[in-house]
Image (cartoon, rainbow, N blue to C red):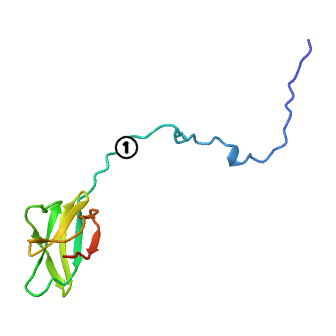
Amino acid sequence: MKKTTKTTKTKALTPAKKAATAAKPKTKAAPAVKKNKIAKATPVTTAPATTTISALIDVGFGNALYLRGEGPGLSWDQGLPMDCVADAEWSLIVHDAAAPLTFKFLLNDQTWCTGADYTLAPGKNGAFTPEF
């Protein structure tokens, strides 16, 4: 019987492979966003705003300017007195306006200014020149 011997071949030593080929930790990619998918809309609430109405007019000594209309604190039946802030400037601040204001100026809360009603968006400042 013949005896067989196993011979081992020696491999030349090779440098270790780069760490890049080593097992990488698996990470999950972010899910893809579908372009056709419509996101649910969150209701948009309009925060009440402060609106300043100014009238640039000299109403004469002893007279006052009033404002009537639609909006927070305004009424078509009774006017709100405006503050005299300069010789020919009157001002009124309306708080909590959530919709456009519609108004007219009155001299001494009796005489209406001429022309159409004025309108001002909530949160805006407006300067008007009424005529009587």
In the rendering, at what x and y percent does residue 65 appear?
A: 13, 76
Crowd band around label 1 with a 10 angstrom C-alpha radius: few (<14), some (14–19), many (20+) = few
Side (left or right) of 93 relative to 34: left
Which residue is painted at 8% across and 61% down in the image? Answer: 77
- 65 is higher (above) or lower (below) than 121: below
Q: Quadrant of residue 108?
A: bottom left
Side (left or right) of 98 relative to 77: right
Q: Quadrant of residue 52?
A: bottom left
Residue, disc 1: 41
- 49 is higher (above) or lower (below) than 54: above
Residue nearer the viewer, 57 or 115? 115
- 83 is higher (above) or lower (below) than 27: below
Which residue is painted at 62% across and 42% down in the image? Answer: 24
Which residue is painted at 20% across and 85% down in the image? Answer: 88
In the rendering, at what x and y percent does residue 25 appear?
A: 58, 42
In the rendering, at what x and y percent does residue 125 appear?
A: 28, 71
Residue nearer the viewer, 40 or 91? 91
Side (left or right) of 27 relative to 102: right
Screen quadrant of the N terminus? top right
Screen quadrant of the C terminus? bottom left
Q: Most extreme residue toward the right, as rendered?
A: 2
Which residue is painted at 19% across and 61% down in the image? Answer: 96
Q: Most extreme residue toward the top, as rendered?
A: 1
In the rendering, at what x and y percent does residue 5 appear?
A: 87, 23
**Secondary structure under badge 1?**
loop
Residue type of the residue flagged with mark 1: Ala
Residue nearer the viewer, 62 or 93? 62
Side (left or right) of 68 relative to 100: left
